[in-house]
Amino acid sequence: MVKKIREKKKIAVDELTDALAVAQSAVFTDYRGISTSELTTIRMKLREAGVGYRVLKNTLARRAADNTDHANIKSAFEGPVAMAYSSSDGVAPAKVLMDYLAGSKSTLKVTGGYLSNKLISVEEVAELAKLPSREVLISKVLAGMQSPIAGLAMVLNGPARGLAVVLQARMKQLEG
């Protein structure tokens, strides 16, 4: 019986270690007072955005943090803690949770977060949630890079276009 419990705990620590190792960001929440149906709704919204959500056992979470290079987040594992995390979009956990909290009367509380191997405060999580998604930021950067190139092409093409217009006008003048 004791061996089975230890094996289950080892598996839980290994799964959490894997989740922490690949997570770009995480948001920690206090889920006290949340009904099961509300927690299910939150999980569905997070899952739609590609975000995982796990209720953590603090001792196992601390062990998992020790197994990664994120040992500095152990202080976040106090009291009832759940973690929303994403390996693909660093903004998604904060954005989905803060949007949910803004649109509901939930008792869920954001207690902090993790970004780039650093603990962040609740205020920083709120600021992170205001950032546009990764795809929007990339498109803005690419548009900013494309604009000067398009302008250069127009400037370089201008004299040739002007010459073509002048030649076309001269041909019409000679014909008629």
Image: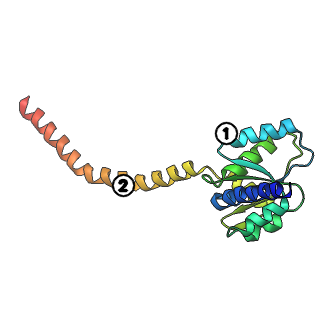
Q: Residue at x 72, y 62 (%)?
A: 114
Horizontal side of 32 relative to 146 (left or right) equals: right
Depicted 156 relative to depicted 78: above or below? above
Name which quarter of the figure residue 152 lies in.
bottom left
Name the residue tied to disc 2.
149
Instruction: Kindly give the residue lying farthest to the left in the view shown.
Output: 174
Q: Residue at x 89, y 39 (%)?
A: 35
> Is residue 111 in sight in this rendering?
no
- Name the amino acid, label 1: Glu
Residue closer to the observer: 87 or 104: 87
Q: Residue at x 81, y 54 (%)?
A: 4
Foreground mark, 2 or 1? 1
For label 1, the crowd category at 10 Å Cα-Cα, with few meaning under 14, some 14 to 19 and many 20 or more, is few
Horizontal side of 159 relative to 137 (left or right) equals: left
Depicted 70 relative to depicted 81: above or below? below
Q: What's the colour scheme? A: rainbow
Q: Secondary structure at mark 1?
A: helix
- Name the amino acid, label 2: Ile
Name which quarter of the figure residue 69 lies in.
bottom right
Residue closer to the observer: 54 or 162: 54
Disc nearer the start of the sequence (2/1): 1
Q: Quadrant of the C terminus?
A: top left
Name the residue tied to disc 1.
48
- Residue 164 placed where, x, y %? 17, 43
Depicted 159 relative to depicted 100: above or below? below
